[in-house]
Image (cartoon, grey):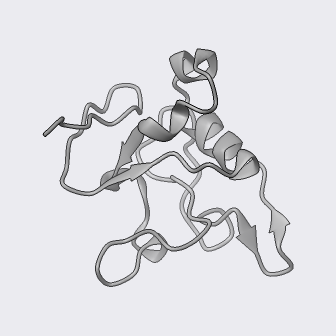
Amino acid sequence: MKLKICCVPGCGGNTSKMHYIPKNPQIQQVWLERIGNKKLSQIDVNLLRGYAVCDKHFDAMCKNPSGKLLRYSLPTNNLPAYNIPSDRGNCFAIYRNKVPIRG
């Protein structure tokens, strides 16, 4: 079994809970901006789905009781390119009137 390593720069985490970069282009772009890994911007978008972010980069409000990410969740914690405190408005890509949140 291949061990996944977190793609957030400086993390290298390999917790049991890893979350793959989403396919949705708008949500994927926000993830990439927040992750801040310049190497990922050079990778074909079809291959990005194979990269993962460890659980410590997601706030508890982004997960269900079993630890699975809720739909439209965004990484918000322990990110070198994003240091805004987590709240409901920045933990999800689509909130209230289904308006996409940018970075």
Q: Residue at x 61, y 15 (%)?
A: 42
Position of the N terminus, as image quadrant, is top left
Q: Is residue 27 above or below residue 67?
A: above
Q: Is residue 3 above or below residue 88?
A: above
The image quarter containing residue 11 is: top left
Looking at the image, which residue sits at the far left?
Answer: 1
Q: Residue at x 74, y 69 (%)?
A: 94
Q: In this rendering, would 78 be left or right of 74?
A: left
The image quarter containing residue 87 is: bottom right
Q: Is residue 13 above or below residue 44?
A: below
Count of residue discs: 0
Q: Residue at x 43, y 65 (%)?
A: 59
Horizontal and vertical percent position of residue 57: 40, 51
Q: Is residue 100 above or below residue 67?
A: above
Horizontal and vertical percent position of residue 54: 33, 48
Horizontal and vertical percent position of residue 45: 64, 30
The image quarter containing residue 92 is: bottom right
Query: Between 102 and 43, which is closer to the camera in this rendering?
Result: 43
Q: In this rendering, would 17 be left or right of 46?
A: left
Query: Between 26 and 34, which is closer to the camera in this rendering?
Result: 26
Q: Residue at x 69, y 62 (%)?
A: 93
Q: In this rendering, would 1 be left or right of 74?
A: left
Horizontal and vertical percent position of residue 50: 43, 37
